[in-house]
Image (cartoon, coloured by chain):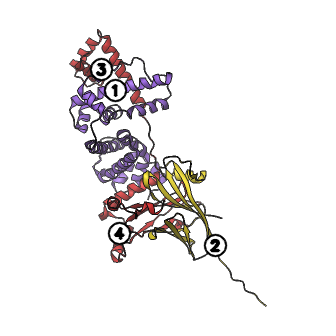
Chain colours: A purple, B yellow, C red
Amino acid sequence: MATKQEHAALTDEKLVRLAQRGDMRAFEELVARHRDKIYARAFSMVRNEDDAVDLSQEAWVKAWQRLKQFQGESSFVTWMTRIVINLCLDHLRKVKRHRAESIELMEEESGGVERQMPVVQVNPTEGLERGEIRQRIDKAMGQLSYEHRTVLILHEFEQLEYKEIAKRMQCSIGTVMSRLFYARRRMANLLASFKREELS
Amino acid sequence: MFLAFPVQAANLKLDAKLVWGSDEPSKEHKPVDPALAATLTNTFKWKHYYVITNVVTDIPSRETRKVKISEPCTIEITELEGPKIEVKVIGKGKPVSKTVKQIQKGEVITIGGDAENKCAWFIVITQLE
Amino acid sequence: MKAELELKLQAYLDGELSAGDAREVDASLAHDPEAQQLLAELRTTVGVLRDNEPLMPLPESRDFYWSKIERAIESAQPERVQPLLAFWYSLRRILVPVAGVALVLFLGIASLKVNTVSDPLAHLAEVESLSEHVSSFSFRSQSQNMFVVWLHENADEQAATDSDDDFDDAVLQ
């Protein structure tokens, strides 16, 4: 049986093939390699560490169970990311049923709020170090409703098309477009406000 | 005259700590030493680790010592051939778990679980020289 | 600016317009400074986001994280257990359960290093749950030279129990 070091030297494709034949150590190497990314995707969506750990682990278990269905049509990590996104969406839908509609979403659905936001003319992250930019984006994401955050994540970070996002979020393409527009405008204004706070 | 002195096996000297893990800092509790903090931080998710109790105990060969690590919790450590140790966790008078493990110098044996408020408890056992 | 035009601008940026609609937007942009500014803001925001996705490292060690996954995988497929576990399940059927004692045998076998003189059996361990309310799993962190036994209340017990006999209170108070 291959050692940990030998597995570490294999490509994802080879590890997947071994894991599909039941090699748990090969799967463990895939987990070690991509766990941060899968966890990060879960956290970005649910914004709760414990839930993100649980959901990411559930995604890995599901991946093991469905591994034989993976035919290499995308990269392994892309396939894994889709699994964790779906689990997060299911989780968020369950949570949403138990809480009131967010004010943000109500504003968006009543229409027009984003048009009252001034256009941000200067890049609000200009001159900042990458780490600082990431922190500010993370802070801004935390201030969006889950619907707006999700549509932003699926479009900007997962590069999904409107149609695919609509299917996953179980809404119309029109709703995706409105939410995405609002989320982007709100993000620009939040980043600009952080910059103003820093300068004042 | 020939005097025979009984040969005694060296006692096993162990350090047992009850450690509390939390994401919130606490000024009221003493943090664990940096080496243990690094070991725990690199394994578990909590950010801060505090010593609640620290007991050093000598366990003669093939004998058992009871160590009270908190009001409701005692651990019974038995030195077995190997040398191995058997660690029984007893909570509120009821046995909870038993672990039998060969003890290695430098190795840390940790028995832990989740606690209230998203914290955790750890019983950390190491062999002393 | 009308909402419809704004969404069209966005779709234009995202490459979601048909060729004809895209040409229309192109043409109207030339005479509409407000639309140009809005498009610039959207383009900047998209660029900033795509280049700077926040990083979020997993707050658990490799071993701890993997051990929970491994356990979940194994408990979800009892009919495909490894030979050692299969032996163990059959032995469990023979043992008479006394007061809910569940015996879990864990074998941790350290990877053999060429230059080591350490006993490969050194990492063998036996872990037993002595309470019907508590389950356990264990693993060894090679990097930290630590053997861990993790105890947790069974899920059904967590829902039902709210008494002084709470397991966690039995250790920390």
Residue ID for mark 1: A184
Instruction: Label 3: state its secondary structure.
Output: helix
Percent position (x, y) of residue A162?
A: 25, 31
- Gap in Å between the C-alphas at discs 3 and 4? 65 Å
The quarter of the picture where the N terminus of chain A appears is bottom left
From the viewer's perspective, is the residue at label 4 or at label 2 nearer?
A: 2
Chain under label 4?
C
Density class for disc 2 (Cα within 10 Å; few <14, some 14-19, many ≥20) is some
- Which residue is depicted at the point 33% across and 14% down? C36
Residue C127 placement: quadrant: bottom left
| Identity, as a three-letter code, of the amino acid under mark 4 | Ala
Instruction: Label 4: state its secondary structure.
Output: helix
- Which residue is depicted at the point 52% across and 68% down? B75
C114 left or right of B10 in image: left
From where the camera sits, is residue C170 visible? yes
From the viewer's perspective, is the residue at label 4 or at label 1 nearer?
A: 1
- Is label 3 on the same chain as label 1? yes
Density class for disc 4 (Cα within 10 Å; few <14, some 14-19, many ≥20) is some
Residue ID for mark 3: A115
Residue ID for mark 4: C86
C130 left or right of B122 in image: left
- Gap in Å between the C-alphas at discs 3 and 2? 78 Å
- Gap in Å between the C-alphas at discs 4 and 2? 39 Å
Percent position (x, y) of residue B12?
A: 62, 70
Rendered image: mark on residue B65: none
From where the camera sits, is residue A127 visible? no
- Towards the viewer: A115 or A156: A115
